[in-house]
Amino acid sequence: MGRWEPNAPGRLTVAALDLYVERGYEQTTVAEIAARAGVTERTFFRHFADKREVLFDSSSGLVELLIEETAAAPVDASPLEAIQFALEAAAERFFEKRGEFARKRQRVLAANPPLAERELMKLTAFATAMAGALRDRGVPAMAAQMAAEAGMVALRVAFTRWAEGDDERLTPLLREAFADLRAALSP
């Protein structure tokens, strides 16, 4: 290994994602990720439990953002509007700033069912956190959970279109997905 360089977690994430796209997730080893990032395997395991977690490490900051923005939604917003408000903030402040990374990551997830399953678990955690923020706003538990889960469906549809397309912005696709969701629920 050469001289110490900062941001080992970031370098490991980029190296892992690049290798997953080039070789495939299953064919990539932790040793290869560490070597590409210029660190030891021991350093890899200081930052990540396994090679799967490299793709899911940024979730905690996103959960906090979703909770904060759900709470900050306008007072008169319906539960679903509050969820949309939070997800639009996340689109602008988180996803759109990481466009290339998000697109590569989405390709890796789509090609690997166990990773896609882990992604669904992450989305469930997002929904649970946002439902908690809705309950704190006085929304009954069942309505809060349903609004949050419906929001995750809209996010998945919009995010997939964004990641597979060439739109620079996720927010308009998210708005369209919420409009379609509302239309589907209307008599």
Image: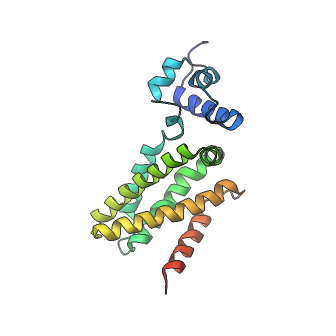
Residue nearer the viewer, 114 or 139: 114
Q: Is residue 121 left or right of residue 51?
A: left
Residue nearer the viewer, 114 or 141: 114
Specify whether residue 129 is in view.
yes
Above-or-below relation of 133 to 24: below
User: Which x, y percent locates residue 123?
Assistant: 46, 54
Specify whether residue 68 is in view.
no
Q: Residue at x 71, y 34 (%)?
A: 22
Q: Residue at x 62, y 57 (%)?
A: 160
Q: Is residue 144 left or right of residue 111?
A: left
Q: Is residue 4 left or right of residue 70?
A: right
The quarter of the displayed image where residue 147 is located = bottom left
User: Which x, y percent locates residue 125?
Assistant: 40, 52
Residue nearer the viewer, 129 or 24: 24
The N terminus sits in image quarter: top right
The quarter of the displayed image where residue 36 is located = top right
Above-or-below relation of 184 to 2: below
